[in-house]
Image: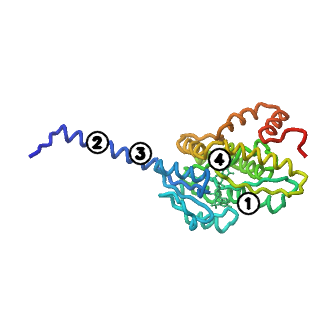
Amino acid sequence: MRHTTSRQTDAYGGRLKAKLIDSFKKMSLKKKILVTGVSKGIGKAIALDLIGKGHEILGTCRNPHTLSDKISGVKYFALDLKDENSIQNCFEAVGEIDVLINNAGESQMGPAEEMSDKEVRDIFETNFFGTISLTKKFIPAMRRKKKGLIINISSLSGRFAVPFQSSYASSKIALNTWTLCIRKELRPFHVSVSLLEPYFIKSGIKTDYIVDERSAYKKMTDRVSESRKATLNKAKEPEVVAKTVAKIIESKSPKGIYISGGMGPFYALLNRFLTSSRAEKMTNKVTGLTGDDLV
Ligand SMILES: NC(=O)c1ccc[n+]([C@@H]2O[C@H](COP(=O)([O-])OP(=O)(O)OC[C@H]3O[C@@H](n4cnc5c(N)ncnc54)[C@H](OP(=O)(O)O)[C@@H]3O)[C@@H](O)[C@H]2O)c1
């Protein structure tokens, strides 16, 4: 017959207590997080990383029912940011959350002169109007609870005024300003708002390329497009953005602006100190818009 000594009982009690404290800590650190656009690319990398860290992840894309490579453990919801009914339905299905990560977005490229108003409005609908409409639905509960975090994924292309990305870059700059304004409005309610501006990321992002074969800008757009493809091929993987997102979530006091991806932080710093004409030269060089034979 085995006898349990009081020392063994104490050791067992100590281990049990440590386990309980550990699971309590994990429970209180576990957050309910909504990530938009998790079907691929950056959003998928964010969802994978956060679910691995034990959070409850709710993810969106336009057609979750036809998505073949779902992430185990992620709860999927349909969301089309161009459709107000879809935004409302998604909000109602999801319920209250601790963290909102606005990642879903579309890309567009072409000469500003040749883009139709509809094409420009369309990209603003997803990257700006739809995104802010969704965010506004989650703000009241966060404000009342005096708790919450919103991370808006924008793009460095806005700051650099990337040629032939006028609609995309403008939609992202609009999102930047909106994000930094609401950050100030929500701070007294202890709701944190952060902007994350990735540099080029090798996500497989598809870009609507709008340029006529006979366009006066054809040679230039082709050159910028080729340079963009080459940079994207050498770019960092989406996991680098996921790492920054995790850092924001774990931060006690998230900053207003985060920049992520390869040379992004360096270029952003340089851009702040260069004169506008030097900054313009730098953007032209990075985007391939150099030489005398552009047209
Ligand atoms: N890749 C880069 O170099 C880069 C650089 C800077 C910033 N960013 C930004 O990072 C974010 C993610 O980009 P990514 O490269 O991962 O792109 P991606 O691979 O094309 O993924 C975009 C995601 O957004 C969703 N989405 C697209 N249009 C939508 C709409 N109208 N309504 C709802 N969801 C929509 C897509 O879902 P479905 O199509 O399945 O619905 C998909 O899950 C975007 O905001 C992008 O602007 C990317």
Distance of label 3 from label 2 (alpha carbons): 15 Å
Q: Earlier in the sequence, mark 3 or mark 2?
A: 2
Please give the name of the residue rendered at 67% of the width and 62% of the height, measured from the top-left corner. Answer: 81
The residue tagged 2 is 15
Distance of label 1 from label 3 (alpha carbons): 40 Å
Q: Earlier in the sequence, mark 4 or mark 1?
A: 1
The residue tagged 3 is 25
Mark 1 and ligand 1: say if the CB distance to the nearest ligand atom is below 8 Å: yes
- At label 1, the amino acid type is Glu
Q: Nearer the viewer, residue 92 or 54?
A: 54
The answer to whether residue 33 is visible is yes
Residue 2 in the image: state x and y as whole percent. 11, 44
Q: Nearer the viewer, mark 1 or mark 3?
A: 1
Residue 230 in the image: state x and y as whole percent. 72, 44
Q: Nearer the viewer, mark 4 or mark 3?
A: 4
Rate crowding at label 2 as few (under 14), some (14 to 19) or many (20 or more) other CA atoms within 10 Å.
Answer: few
- At label 3, the amino acid type is Lys
The residue tagged 1 is 125
Q: Secondary structure at mark 4?
A: loop
